[in-house]
Amino acid sequence: MSRDLVSFGVLGTVELRVAGRPATPLAPAVRALLARLVLAAGRVVSADALTDALWGDQPPADATNALQLRVSKLRRALVATGAGGELLVTRAPGYQLAVASAAVDAYRFERLLERARSVTTGDGPAAALACFDEALRLWRGPALADVGDAEWALAEAARLEELRLGAVEDRLELLLEAGRQAEAVADLERLVAAHPLRERLHRLLMLALYRGGRQADALTAYHALRHRLADELGIDPAPELQALAEAILRQQVPAPTPPAAPPMAGPADRPAATQTRTAPAPLPAPRTPQRGDLPRRLASVIGRQDDVHRVLDRLREARVVTLTGPGGVGKTTLALEAVRHADDALADRVHLVRLAALPSGTDLPEAVAGQLGVAAGGPGPTATAALVAWLGADRSLVVVDNCEHVIDEAAELVEQLVAVCPAVTVLTTSREALAVPGETQLAVAPLGVPDGPADLARLGDSPAVALFVDRARAVRPGFVLDETTAPVVADICRQLDGMPLAIELAAARVKALPPGEIAARLHDRFALLTAGARTGEARHRTLRATLDWSHDLLSEAERRLLRRLAVFRGGWDLAATEQVCAFDGLAAEEVLDLLFRLVDRSLVVPDPTTGRFRLLVTIREYAAARLAEVGETETARDRHLGYFTELAERYGPHARTDADAWARLTEEHDNFRAAVDRCLERTDGVDAGLRLADALFLFWNYGPRYEGVRALTALLAAGDTAPAARASALQRIGLLGVYYPTAQTRAAARESLAEFERLGDPVNTATSRLVVAWEGQYDGDADRYRAMVAQAGRERGDTDDPWWHGTVCYVEGLLDLRTGAFERSAEQWRRSLEFTRKDGDRLLPAGILAHLGVALREAGRPDEAIATLEEAAAEARSNPSPHSLAFTLVQLAHTRLDRGEVDGVPAMLADADETARRSGNPRCQAWAAWGRARIAYADGDAVSAADECRRAVDLLKEREFPWARRRLWTLAADAAAAAGRPQEADAARRAAADLAAGR
């Protein structure tokens, strides 16, 4: 990659940027090393200097090797981000980052400062201000914020911070010279508070206040400094400040000198060419409308750039645009940010009207007129007429914020204004639309949250995570998003549904609590999230206050439905709402209208494509608290349990044969979990829970097996039940655990076998015996397990059940795979496939084909294996079975690697790993790690290969074919030896030898 496309940042956290990609945060292990090399700006840094920078006066025993490992990690990080490992050069007596100083933000910052201070200001200070602004925009936070407290880092950070503060002071000085003191006052007040003994800042503040007509405030600022200097240091202000105070007192402060205008050239002064032909004038830049009513932005707006463009697009198309959404989603922030980006193509003037503080019953036209400084002349129609006259024919954009509690009055006023004033456009924010003619609604969504685990760079790109980090750094400047904090912050953002207000309140707690504790305490989020800005509106100071505001605006019937919706998980449809929520004062025929009203009020989120609805988690928690307050929790949850038990019994038996049934079960997965939880909470819930589990078994078996094991185990532990029901539940625990068995699932299978033998149930005895024999795929006496399969066949007797015959072939195929009888195993898989398809099973054939592919590969028939595995992958994707898909993809990846084919394999492994993670399949996650290890080892990256092998071994434990485990241990030994880990390599060789010897 061209070095011109790579840049580095130290003005904030240490970052690496590659053109066209988001900035990449780096792992703690390489951050300090990169920063030290970056600040050398292309110069060689000796190994001794780097060792001192990384470990100070406590270097490791083998410092040379430790430094080489850090350099190796940094080189891999450069490659992973697309920058290229060739940037890091080994050059005596140490290492060099081969980049130009222009690629480092700190050096660009210093060059811009030099230019700003040397630029001529014939056109006034504009050019210098532009340079200062460009320089200061390079800063993203405290310099070297995530490097640590090494002496070199602290010294360099202090130097850069001093340069930054000096640049800020120079810029503010230029603003005062330009007569723009109004823009400087707020920044100066903040800086003086942060640096109370810095006299230059006090001088600039005094000048800004005086020139802004605030003589008394300027003198007060001087006396405050004088007292502080005397109290803390026993000195007086500098003579320059004393002279300025005297001049302010006598009102003899010189006014800023306006920049001299360049002389006008007359015809005689112009070149001949310009006398005969006039050059076209440059196009003027778009003018900004007057925004005198808008507050200054005090905090950055994150993750709303696309939304701002959408709002502006709607404002160009419609005369009334309403931003809707639940409380705390950021409607006001988005509206104000959009208006700040508006140009004069949209309006000449912008006016802001805030309605949040208006009590119910206020005359709205008169209150609006008062906010805009219009003489109303009276309430109602008189005030409306005054507003119409004041707006007149002006091209005005009126922002009306927080309409929900006066929605009818706001709708009436907005409709009248746009009807009579042809050039007026109105942007409103409300938790429900105004419903006036011509209105365009734009729903404001929460910020995007990470969808499951991701690498550090992807997590940092999430708008919700970025907002959390920004607000956390405001209260704890050293806060860093790294491998430890990033997953926790992502989890916090997911738990809070990406709601900006909730995220900001959570981030404020970073001042006192680590992110992990914040995440753990979100079960009581209304007690935790109470740290809103003191100057904010009362309804935004705590999370509960925000939701109380919305709740208080509802009718009693709407409140009743909202709190009962809290029993649903994930989502629900209209039929479920009518069945579960219609009781005690709420009729089924009322539900439809009430539900739509809650949608209109931004409390329920609809999905028009599926006809389903959901509550944001925070709103659901609030509704659940309200449900408990009125004592309806037990009744509502029991109705929920009854409804979803009937639904499971309707669709569960058809999970493997009917695509629609599988889709319906998947859709209601979260509600089934909640129903199981309800059974576990009830003292009499065991039988109801086992009834539900019976209906869900096939869904669990082809999907979240671990969930079925956990539910059945908990139900059996919760109380006594009939012996046959207990034996059946134990058998299912065993069946759900056959692919990655545990001591618990093996014991359950054996107990079910003993219980069914005692009960004299030959069919279930045969099934349980087959489940026990299934264990033989990984270890134990294979002949004994084959005998168990034969005995199970005799116990079952003559049967034409295709499921039974297909399963017997399946188990025998596994036993043959384990013992290396690969040709015979392939034949068993073909027979199992025939029986399974005859049974109408849509989901299992993909897994059978995948095992057939493995048998063919191990039998030395790679072409047939790949064709079979590709067929299995297509089958698994068309008839979704996450376990089959994950297993197929990892086996296809390894088969391609056997043939030396690497293209596309990393993506295949990543897909398999993610699918396995989501479905709780550690075996396939292990195969994915093994595949990554093979690729890394082939690329010469022994350290990564050894790490991935270790991960694969930890995930597999003993749950894999012995020949496969032997190969994995062999690779682990080779990788560990190449990585300089002799003890690890010896242990891996011993494990491989034990497997080869059958031990």
Image (cartoon, rainbow, N blue to C red):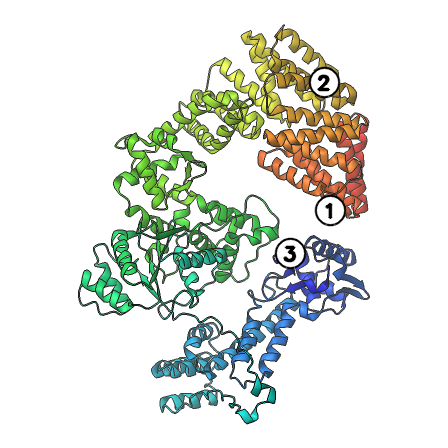
The x and y percentages for residue 683 are 40, 25
Of 697 and 592, the residue lying toward us: 592
Give the Cα separation between the discs numbered 2 and 3. Answer: 50 Å
Residue that appears at 72% across and 36% down = 893
Circle nearer the viewer, 1 or 2 = 2
Nearest the camera: 479 or 836? 836
Residue nearest the viewer, comparing 256 with 279: 279
The reply to whether residue 679 is in sight is: yes
Distance, label 3 to label 1, CA atoms, is 17 Å
Q: Percent x, y for residue 118?
A: 60, 83
Quadrant of the snapshot with the C terminus: top right
Whether label 2 touches label 3, CB < 8 Å: no
Q: Earlier in the sequence, mark 3 or mark 1?
A: 3
Mark 2 burial class by Cα count in 10 Å: few <14, some 14-19, many 20+: many
**Pointer 2 or 3: first along the chain:** 3
Q: Which mark is residue 828?
A: 2
Q: Residues within 10 Å of mark 3 (few under 14, many from 20)?
A: many
Give the residue number, with chain letter if any, for mark 3: 26
Q: Which-is-in-front pick, marks 2 and 3?
A: 2
SS under mark 1: helix
Q: CA distance from mark 1 to mark 2?
A: 38 Å
Please report contact status of discs 3 and 1: CB closer than 8 Å, yes or no. Answer: no
Left or right of 760: which side holds 54?
right
Q: Amino acid at mark 1?
A: Ser
Q: Which residue is mark 1?
A: 944
Q: Residue furthest bottom?
A: 268
Residue 947 falls in image quadrant: top right
Tell me the kind of residue under disc 2.
Gln
